[in-house]
Image (spheres, helix red, strand yellow):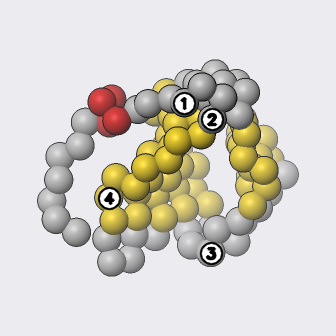
Amino acid sequence: MKAENINLNKEIKFSKGGIVSKVIADGKESEISLFCMARGTAMSEHTSGREATVLVLKGKGTFDLAGKEIVLLPGVLIFMPAKTRHSLAAEDNLAFLLYLA
């Protein structure tokens, strides 16, 4: 991966009633994606084969992590071990970074 400077505020774009995701950094063993979820959208329960970290940038939502509900607000950071069940829903337009390692 080459060194880059990314202005996340310029990258946040919401789609009416949809979810937009964009890989913003991709390394040999890691990846960072920006997710923008429109108000009222949700991701059903799923798992990831890799460890993951979520950092909320904008908006409000809920995150279910293995049965524990977490309120998503700017600045909230969540760490998930690989294969942990999780789902999320956007109460307002919600933007977050997903780091997979």
Crowdedness near tag 1: few (<14), some (14–19) or many (≥20) residues, C-alpha within 10 Å: few
Disc nearer the start of the sequence (3/4): 4
Residue 61 lies, with reference to residue 83, above or below; the image says above
Task: Please give the label number shown on residue 15.
Answer: 1
Q: Nearer the viewer, mark 3 or mark 1?
A: 1
The amino acid type found where label 2 is placed reads Gly
Query: What residue did someone put label 2 on?
Result: 18
Amino acid of disc 4: Ala
Residue under pointer 4:
25
CA–CA distance in space, label 2 to label 1: 5 Å
Give the crowd class for mark 2: few <14, some 14-19, many >=20 residues within 10 Å.
few
Q: Secondary structure at mark 4?
A: strand
The residue sitting at 16% across, 65% down in the picture is 2
Quick one: label 2 or label 3, which is nearer the N terminus? 2
Q: Amino acid at mark 3?
A: Gly
Q: Residues within 10 Å of mark 3 (few under 14, many from 20)?
A: few
- Tell me the SS state at disc 1: loop
* Residues at discs 3 and 1 in contact (Cβ within 8 Å): no
Label 2 close to label 1 by CB (< 8 Å): yes
**Which is nearer the N-term, disc 1 or disc 4?**
1
Quarter residue 83 falls in: bottom right
Q: CA distance from mark 2 to mark 3?
A: 25 Å
Q: Secondary structure at mark 3?
A: loop
